[in-house]
Amino acid sequence: MYFLSLFFTFAFAYDNGSPLASLSPRGWNSWSTDDIAGLLDLCFEGEIHEVADSMVSSGMVAAGFNLILLDDCWSSTNRSASGQLQPDPLRFPSGIPALVSFLDSRGLSLGLYTCAGSKTCKYDRPGSYGHYDTDAGTMSKWGVRWIKADNCSPPPGSARDYFSSFSRAVNSTGVPIVFHSCEWGLDDVAAWGPNVTQVYRVRPDHLPFWWFNLPGAYPPGGQGTGDIIEGMADPAVLAGQGPYSWPDPDVLHTGLFQTEAESQTEFSFWSLWGAPLLLATDPRNMSDFKRSVVLNEEALDVQRGDAIFGRGARRVRGDNSTGVQVWVKTLGEGGPAVIILYNSGDWLPVDISIDWEELGGGWPTNVSLNGRDLWMHADIFTAQKSGAKATGIPVHGVRMWKLSVSV
Ligand code: GLA
């Protein structure tokens, strides 16, 4: 029995060769574009062409944002006469293969949304339950390279079982397609996700507010950016992270209902966690500020890391009740470390001091460190002994520093 379960685990340990998931993914998701919970769908062929072109001209594609993921918006409300998913004829009159080749010529891959259950979460579009092989086959033939499978109208049985069945169907197409489960952190997904999917949602839907945690909400855990940061502090959530195994805290709302400090905080945390960077806001006509966030190369380097593929972020001090938090990712023993000093309080700027001993992760104590601020793009101290202090961190703001041993 043990042998069998070991075999099962490795059989789906889930390097399927997809170039979109060997490193932590980057892309754009059509869900919730400059709105709340997808009230307006940015999901018509012409719009998607414009988004693709803007991702090229803004430098996003060159920076590795090479996926366009169409969410719960692209499909017709009915299957075709032969039982296949089909695009909404008004939204995508030229069909999906034409869109794939348009994107391909711009260095972008196409992802499509469906649902592991019988209906999608919005407008009851057809889900894939009972059609996993058919739908995986249809999408692979269209040239789709990422499938997001949601969890509304769920099938009977355990989530692990039905997501595994869908994943096997995707795998049996023989095409390296990323399978992205969207199960909101329920049913212990962080434990089995790494063996079943390449990308697995670990938090509820991210809304463009800092706090949004209604009592009794389902799924539980809170939907504001601050709530998601709190949820990601559970070490179990990031435990299975690595190539082809990316816990997904959900999309980024860069610049929407956020102060500039909040936009930087959001991007800092997603990068520190090595999380997929799936932009929800509109990449067309990005403001200079938004571009400076999304294309911050120093933060992007933290997302993918150099030595360890971006793994190992953890909170070492504080929580939402204390207002002052310290998060660390050490990139190898004695290698550089990245820290986030975070003011999760709602009212006043704070000063945060850090003692180098808090870094942990095999770092030597009694060392002098150099510090670089990854938002100022400046070296801010050299050979600093024992610790350092950041002053005036704004409400919901951070300092994100890269530390290296001073020699
Ligand atoms: C769920 C998912 C979201 C989005 C919507 C679409 O809420 O969690 O990410 O895909 O469905 O209806």
Image (cartoon, helix red, strand yellow):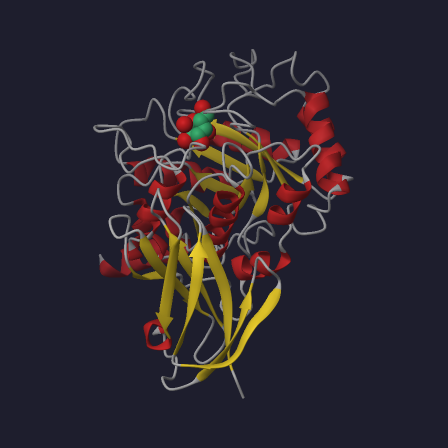
Q: Is residue 364 visible?
A: yes
Residue at x 34% of width, y 32% of height: 212
Q: Is residue 175 visible?
A: no
Apparent side of residue 327 relative to residue 108 in the rendered image (left or right)? left
Apparent side of residue 185 relative to residue 94 in the rendered image (left or right)? left
Residue at x 56% of width, y 13% of height: 80
**Front in this rendered view, residue 182 or 50:** 50
**Front in this rendered view, residue 361 or 255:** 255
**Where in the figure is residue 221, as x and y percent of width and height?**
28, 38
Ligand 1 position by quadrant: top left
Quarter occupied by residue 69: top right
**Front in this rendered view, residue 205 or 101:** 205
Apparent side of residue 204 relative to residue 35 in the rendered image (left or right)? left
Name the quadrant of the N terminus. Answer: bottom left
**Where in the figure is residue 268, as x and y percent of width and height?**
49, 53
Residue at x 54% of width, y 18% of height: 40
The image shows a total of numbered marks equal to: 0
Q: Is residue 222 above or below residue 304?
A: above
**Where in the figure is residue 8, as x and y percent of width and height?**
34, 53
